[in-house]
Image (cartoon, rainbow, N blue to C red):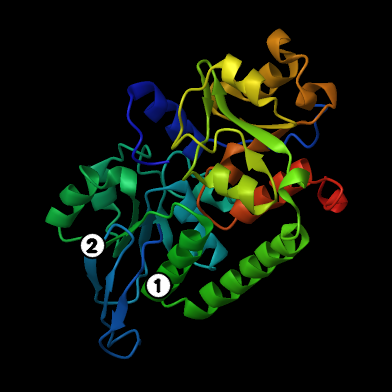
């Protein structure tokens, strides 16, 4: 969800990345490699790690971090999933999962964190995001903080990000176990959908937002989720997160609609649009009641819970193969 021009698109996609809610359960309601070189043994007193993060920056970590600040909700979720919650001393206003994150001091917004607040918390590691690359990270680097940037754009890179965090924090074993669990769940889904023919793949329309109508094209996480579970993205010939005309949607005649839900004050507004827009009344997705809402902090956050989004996409697109997930 990076590299998108246009103020409106940036605002909407920022909400997709950071805002969450509960799941609306049914229709009724290029890989960046990470190079890591350990220069000494990993002990509390004798430790040095030099690596290239997912922003392409060379970083040296001189001790196992004990005070970590997360500058993105997905980073926070990775840290807690690795059992490092007790070392997290600062999070953003939008870090709402797990519940324990609510009790950690806030350093402000996602794109505009409070630099002075970060300094006051005296972190020995800051986990940043690409949205902070141009302005925030240089300011923190000038002050000598150790910063590791995460920037996964697909599932493979999410697994790489988890590996990287495990290496940086000394939690390699926990990272390996989490990746093994996630890969097993991914493989279980792919094994059920790998033999589906093109004729058996339903046409899927994913709605980011409805005013204006925005979708997910090639190269997006949502496009990857649709393809992995055996669907055809009707916006697959577009790229990034473009506007799309209602006429183009009607021409594509989608059989399944999945909407993001939980975007700020919009809550399930996009889901309700898909259910009630009169001009969509005759498409197969509406005729067969195959409209689903998936929380944007599952499908839009590049962390461990992305697997839950994959499972929910699978249940929406192929309920005959995944009845237990509905």
The residue to which callout 1 is attached is: 169
Nearer the observer, 169 or 301: 301
Query: Which comes sooner in the sequence, label 1 or label 2?
Result: 2
Residue 269 visible in the picture: no
Numbered label tally: 2
**Residue drawn 76% across and 14% down?**
281
Is residue 289 shown above or below 1? above
Q: Closer to the observer: label 1 or label 2?
A: 2
Q: Residues within 10 Å of mark 2 (few under 14, many from 20)?
A: few
The quarter of the displayed image where residue 122 is located? bottom left
Spot occupied by residue 35 in the image (x, y as percentages of width and height): 32, 74
Horizontal arrangement in the rendering, residue 195 relative to residue 102 (left or right)? right
Q: Secondary structure at mark 2?
A: loop
Nearer the observer, 320 or 63: 320
Q: Are marks 1 and 2 in contact (CB under 8 Å)?
A: no
Is residue 207 shown above or below 314? above
Figure quadrant of the N terminus: top left
Spot occupied by residue 258 in the image (x, y as percentages of width and height): 67, 33
Q: Secondary structure at mark 1?
A: helix
Spot occupied by residue 129 in the image (x, y as percentages of width and height): 35, 50
**Residue drawn 73% across and 49% down?**
314
Is residue 91 shown above or below 156? above
Q: Which mark is residue 247?
A: none
In the image, farthest residue toward the bottom: 41
Spot occupied by residue 75 in the image (x, y as percentages of width and height): 45, 55
Figure quadrant of the C terminus: top right
Nearer the observer, 133 or 30: 30
């Amino acid at each position: 969800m990076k590299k998108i021009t246009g103020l409106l698109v940036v605002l909407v996609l920022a909400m997709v990345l950071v805002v969450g809610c509960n799941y609306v359960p049914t229709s009724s309601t290029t890989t960046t490699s990470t190079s890591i070189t350990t220069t000494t043994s990993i002990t509390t007193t004798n430790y040095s790690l030099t690596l290239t993060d997912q922003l392409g920056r060379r970083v040296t970590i001189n001790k196992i971090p004990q005070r970590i600040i997360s500058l993105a909700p997905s980073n926070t979720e990775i840290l807690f999933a690795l059992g490092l919650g007790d070392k997290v001393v600062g999070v953003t206003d939008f870090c709402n999962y797990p519940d324990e994150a609510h009790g950690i001091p806030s350093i402000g917004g996602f794109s505009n964190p409070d630099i002075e607040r970060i300094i006051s918390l005296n972190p020995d590691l800051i986990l940043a995001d690409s949205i902070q690359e141009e302005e925030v990270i240089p300011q923190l680097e000038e002050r000598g903080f150790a910063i590791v940037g995460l920037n996964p754009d697909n599932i493979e890179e999410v697994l790489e990000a988890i590996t990287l965090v495990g290496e940086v924090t000394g939690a390699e074993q926990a990272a390996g176990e989490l990746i093994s669990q996630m890969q097993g769940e991914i493989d279980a889904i792919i094994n059920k959908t790998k033999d589906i023919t093109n004729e058996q793949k339903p046409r899927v329309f994913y709605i980011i937002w409805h005013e204006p109508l925005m979708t997910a094209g090639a190269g997006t996480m949502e496009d990857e989720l649709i393809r992995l579970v055996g669907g055809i993205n009707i916006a697959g010939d577009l790229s990034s997160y473009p506007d799309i005309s209602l006429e183009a949607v009607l021409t594509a005649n989608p059989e399944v609609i999945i909407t993001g839900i939980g975007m700020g004050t919009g809550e399930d507004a996009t889901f309700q649009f898909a259910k009630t827009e009169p001009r969509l009344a005759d498409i197969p997705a509406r005729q067969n009641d195959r409209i689903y809402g998936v929380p944007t902090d599952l499908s839009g956050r590049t962390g461990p819970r992305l697997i839950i989004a994959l499972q929910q996409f699978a249940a929406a697109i192929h309920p005959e193969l995944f009845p237990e997930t509905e």
